[in-house]
Amino acid sequence: MGIEERSTLVFASGVGRIKEEKPKASRPQGDGVVRIMLKRLGGGKMASVVSGIPMNEDELKELARALKQKCGVGGSVKDFNIEIQGDKRNVLKAELEKKGYTVKLAGG
């Protein structure tokens, strides 16, 4: 890999600072099945990860907000996956099935 491939224009004297637009992340295509898996974190902590929901990022944040309220815990949306603190797989499965999704519990 040469220097030309690694370098980018940062400043031009007539224009000023050059900012490159970062590409928007696109939602990965799924098979129509919502999967809920348990992610083990350090210190004995766990998080339930919901993946495969066919929504854009804004709708996904609204769904995550509703699921967090139903479970009574915190969480976040990362890379088109919803992460809910704790082992709340059964509650999440029931709520998502009420909303009409096909849900599978993934992992061991």
Image (cartoon, rainbow, N blue to C red):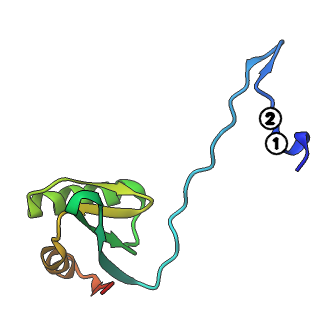
Residue farthest top in this picture: 13
Indicate the amino acid at tag 2: Thr
Q: Is residue 38 left or right of residue 69?
A: right
Give the image location of residue 15, x and y in percent.
78, 16
**How many residues crowd mark 1 within 10 Å: few (<14), some (14–19), many (20+)?**
few
Give the image location of residue 45, x and y in percent.
21, 61
Front-lying residue, 104 or 97: 104
Q: Is residue 19 left or right of residue 30?
A: right
**How many residues crowd mark 2 within 10 Å: few (<14), some (14–19), many (20+)?**
few
Give the image location of residue 25, x and y in percent.
55, 56
State which quarter of the image contains the C terminus: bottom left
SS category of the residue bearing label 2: loop
Task: Say above or below: 72 vs 51.
Answer: above
Marks 2, 1: nearer the viewer = 1
Give the image location of residue 68, x and y in percent.
16, 58
Q: Is residue 52 left or right of residue 26?
A: left
- Residue at 42% across / 61% down in the picture? 56
> Which circle marks residue 8 in the picture?
2
- Residue at 39% across / 66% down in the picture? 55
Q: Quadrant of residue 22?
A: top right
Structural distance between the alpha carbons of marks 2 and 1? 7 Å
Which residue is the site of mark 1? Answer: 6
- Residue at 15% across / 75% down in the picture? 95
Front-lying residue, 87 or 30: 87
Task: Say above or below: 61 vs 35.
Answer: above
